[in-house]
Amino acid sequence: DIQMTQSPSSVSASVGDRVTITCRASQDISSWLAWYQQKPGKAPKFLIYAASSLLSGVPSRFSGTGSGTEFTLTISSLQPEDFATYFCQQADSFPFTFGPGTKVDIK
Amino acid sequence: EVQLVESGGGLVRPGGSLRLSCAASGFTFSNVWMIWVRQAPGKGLEWVGRTKTKTSGETTDYGAPVKDRFIVSRDDSKNTVYLQMNSLKIEDTAVYYCGTDYATRWVGSWGQGILVTVSS
């Protein structure tokens, strides 16, 4: 199975900050990567697919880049509703696997 | 609006069985592959399995930890997807989410999740 790692595991930030999360795959997954947001006690929410394509309705302050084995999720100006845990997921080969998550909390 | 509602969770002994259901509405169920993902308490997400549509052969795929123990099935007449869990282990304790497939690779919409606890 393809292993996914994320860094940092947690980040403390303030409203208005720029936040960048990195996701790495154990092998080349081309651009087959998604990002999800999960708030405590809630189901994950699909944000970005194919590394950089934003789902309709997702604010433009979210962006994704990368290909191969290294990917980033950037929140350009953190808003109060963005405090959550973010997971990446590879979809290059089955079984699809998720990263361990990065928690974004309030500084 | 897509709605997915899981049911059937609860407490079960190791070695036991449980069947989860996920009732879907707000989209043409028979046209959508359906997925199960789980999340152990305080942990990350894990792909459990998926079922394709009839037109795609209604085939199923599973993650390694559940292969040969869990079965995903669907009933298009009831707009419902099932997860039959057999030979349950303590490590199967998790919140189980059903979801809709997006472009054969992602989980587009998610249910609210249902807790399964395996304990003696």
Image (cartoon, helix red, strand yellow):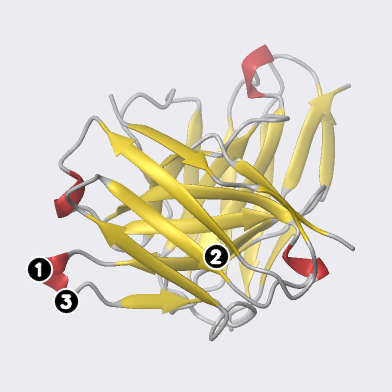
| Residue under numbered circle 1 | B55
Q: Which label is found at residue B47? A: 2
Q: CA distance from mark 1 to mark 2?
A: 23 Å
Within 10 Å of the Cα at label 1, are there few (<14), some (14-19), or many (20+) other Cα atoms?
Answer: few
Quarter location, residue B3: top left
The reply to whether discs 1 and 3 touch (Cβ–Cβ < 8 Å) is: yes
| Residue under numbered circle 3 | B57
Question: Quick one: label 2 or label 3, which is nearer the N terminus?
Answer: 2
Q: Work out whether disc 1 and disc 3 sit on a shared chain.
A: yes
Front position in the image: B95 or B9: B9
Q: Position of residue B11 (x, y in %)?
A: 76, 51
Q: Chain of mark 1?
A: B
Look at the image and tell me in which quarter the C terminus of chain A lies: top right
Q: Position of residue B47 (x, y in %)?
A: 55, 65
Residue A50 in view here: no
The reply to whether discs 2 and 3 touch (Cβ–Cβ < 8 Å) is: no
Quarter location, residue A89: bottom right
Q: Is residue A44 above or below residue A5?
A: above
Identity of the residue drawn at 49% across and 41% down: B6
Helix, strand or loop status at disc 3: loop
Amino acid type of the residue tagged 1 in the rendering: Thr
Amino acid type of the residue tagged 3 in the rendering: Gly
Helix, strand or loop status at disc 1: helix
Q: Nearer the viewer's eye, disc 2 or disc 3?
A: 3
Amino acid type of the residue tagged 2 in the rendering: Trp
Q: Chain of mark 2?
A: B
User: Is residue A45 shown left or right of residue A87?
Assistant: left
